[in-house]
Image (cartoon, grey):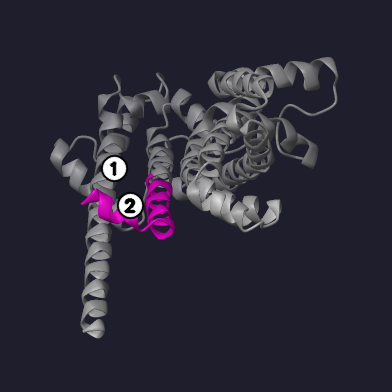
Amino acid sequence: MTTTATAVRQNLWANDWMRFGVRRLGRLLVSLWVVVTASFLMIHLIPGDPVRAALGPTAPAELVAAKRAALGLDDPLWRQYGAYIERLFNGDLGSSLVSQLPVSDVIAQRLPATLTLAVLAFVLAVTIALPIGVGVGVLTRGGRGRRTELAFTAGSVLLGIVPDFLIGVGLVFVFGVSLSWLPVAGNQSPAAYVLPVLCLALGPAAILARILRVELVSVLDADFIRTARAKRLPARVVYLRHALPNAATAALTLGALILSSMVAGTVLIENVFSWPGLGMTIVQSILDKDYPVVQGIVLVYGMGVLLANTVVDVTLALLDPRSIIRED
């Protein structure tokens, strides 16, 4: 009888995970289709002739016509869409109208700088948020430390709502122009990483710390924490082994989402600090009307965000399998 009940529970668990996997895969495929279609339509919705814009107003009409024919821009829209999808399946993102380099090569050259910036900023944000969120949570538990709570809330809200580029301009003015302590452009030295990484990390660190503090205060009042204290467990065991893992679930979910938003947020930061990544490349490509490069970078950003969201969903399901059941 016990064996039969265990088998039934295992079958239900496997079915829940199968439904979860099918839902996530379907959502990912639909989202990918939307991103791909949007990147295709972008070149057709923008006014003007991209080939003429890229080759310049003095380019001979024959050259413009030949380039348009080579790119298939004279074909019906549905045929261009089909050819675009087919090229994507073959890993062909086209060639730059300006440099004539394959778009995949342009992205491969610039992507490491963008990922390095985003990952360093994420690590710094977590490093800042974890001790501050936990520390303030412990100090303000049960209505204590009212002034500390007000100061923390005001500071974290202010940092969370100020746009990254304004923080960047302020950091450049203080540490780059006024004090001349740090370089404000490029990534040629370790010191050049300080300002852009700090600029990208401060806002997310404030949000993460606030979420972590709220979750920790809630967990510290839970029954299982009272039970742990009743057993006279050391405070570090109560906080690190019992309270922090439960409080970190929401912060982990938000943190992964912040990582994907950081990758997208690098567009502004890279242009503030002349960082040679995808963000600076896409802005320059827009100015040059180099739409194949713009399409390719938009695809990379879109797919990166979708992949990060899927990883978040799976991680949350692994940490809390009840979330799978709650979706049914």
Residue 239: image location, x then y, percent: 63, 50
Work out how far the residue at label 2 is from the one at label 1, CA to CA, in angstroms: 30 Å
Q: Position of residue 304 (x, y in %)?
A: 43, 46
Point out the image quarter for the N terminus.
Answer: bottom left
Q: Main secondary structure of the magenta part?
A: helix
Marks 2 and 1 in Cβ contact (< 8 Å) = no
The amino acid type, in three-letter code, at marker 2 is Ser
Q: Which residue is mark 1?
A: 36
Q: Going by the image, does 48 lie left or right of 213? A: left
Q: Can you see residue 245?
A: no
| Residue drawn at 42 percent across, 32 percent down | 290
Front-lying residue, 317 or 192: 317
Q: Which residues are magenta?
A: 306-328
Determine the secondary structure under disc 1: helix
What residue is rendered at 25% in x and 33% in y? 41
Is residue 309 within the magenta segment?
yes
Q: Is residue 30 left or right of residue 157?
A: left
- Label located before the other in sequence (2 or 1): 1
| Placement of 271 over or under 255, stated as above or below | above
Q: Please name the residue that numbered disc 2 is placed on.
A: 323
